[in-house]
Amino acid sequence: MNISELYKIYKQSYQVSTDTRKVEKGCVFFGLKGDNFNGNKFAEDALKKGAAFAVVDEAAYQTKPTIILVNDVLKTMQALASYHRNELGIPIISLTGSNGKTTTKELINAVLSEKYNTTATEGNLNNHIGVPLTLLSMTPKTEIGIVEMGANHLKEIELLCNIAQPDYGYITNFGKAHLEGFGSIEGVIEGKSELYTYLKNHNKTAFVNANDPIQLEKSVAINQVTFGGENTNVSVSFVEANPFVHVQFDNEIVKSQLIGAYNYNNISAALAIGHYFKVKSEDSIKAIENYVPSNNRSQIIHKGSNKIVLDAYNANPSSMEVALENLSNLTDSHKIAILGDMFELGKTAEAEHQFIVDLLSNLSISKAYLIGENFYKCRANEDKIQLFNSYESFKKHFSTLNITNATLLIKASRGMALERVLDIV
């Protein structure tokens, strides 16, 4: 079956699924395969649960007329997504970067939703599977699509661009994330800039943070919409972050519910993109001010007399550094950092963890508790910094403390699941 024929089937519902636990009635089920699973095996189960058709790539599982055999399920789903994207013909905004992708995507979606019917990546489903699923979740009612793209190796963003074919692109920043896969910060810059390469080669447009010299350098010769300070297409200026970020836009002070000065850039991008797409300023401001972070991303939580900055969704050296600097700059008197290991750093892991420890020694932070095998190997000022090789050893110690009237930052890579600290604060 060719893609145009499969597309006619997909159009009957505009719904797809790769998980039999989430099958919607009338959808098309794609039996994806991985190292430890074979979705082909669940084709019949998907049909029983309401799927209209199932797509497999092993002939043994084509047991019914409504089970479609293809050469490669994943490549077929990707091709169908691209076909659908072209049939819709709507503006697609893609964004990538080392930090802040999901928050920025949510802010852009909030702003554009004030005027348009938008469809955006759910959560962080931003890889070679998530991007086509995002595209296939768009319907004829969608007016603008917002597609988050993640990568931890070279050529991944290139692949995702070829699937999504964005009209607009934005790179949040270039930081020390996924160094194990990219090899170095230079590799990160090269990998993320594959979005710029696509935009340039197809005469598309980049939204560029003029406060980031790397963005300015790498986006030369591309159609640009610049934002940030003076002499840009859209002026957004930083006001304060104590703890919530306030910015000035269109002669108004925008009071967000996001913490950390680093969110200034995320807010600015959303306001700039809204301005470009002619969303009224008052509507953009309302969208930013009403946005509340969730899912362990820069959340403010109050427990007893303590204020907790929960930023435990993920971490890398760049995001850890700005989060700690933000904590240090708060006017609160009693500030505590509870940090967990950063993953996917490869051969740089030892140096990057030691860098964070050394940084802590020079910041205005009362106490730091560092958890994980990487941090435990570091040299630290024991008066200010305590090291624990496991969460259990930290928990045993921390549970004996009676911490009150403090501001606590909780941050680590996802695998550390450091939101568990909430149970013992």
Image (spheres, rainbow, N blue to C red):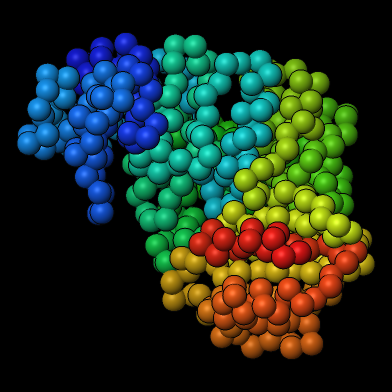
Q: Is residue 7 visible?
A: no
Residue at 44% x, 76% y is: 347
Relative vertical location of residue 140 with respect to residue 298 in this rendering, above or below: above
* Res 283 quadrant in image: top right
**Residue 368 appears left or right of 124:** right
Position of the N terminus, as image quadrant, is top left
* Res 264 quadrant in image: top right
Residue at 12% x, 19% y is: 65
Residue at 35% x, 18% y is: 25
Q: Camera-side residue: 23 or 82?
A: 23
Q: At which x and y percent is residue 425?
A: 76, 64
**Residue 194 appears left or right of 79:** right
Q: At which x and y percent is residue 350?
A: 53, 80
**Residue 357 appears left or right of 4:** right
Residue at 66% x, 43% y is: 294
* Res 29 quadrant in image: top left
Relative vertical location of residue 265 with respect to residue 413 in this rendering, above or below: above
Q: At which x and y percent is residue 291?
A: 73, 34
Q: Camera-side residue: 323 or 68?
A: 68
**Residue 256 appears left or right of 109:** right
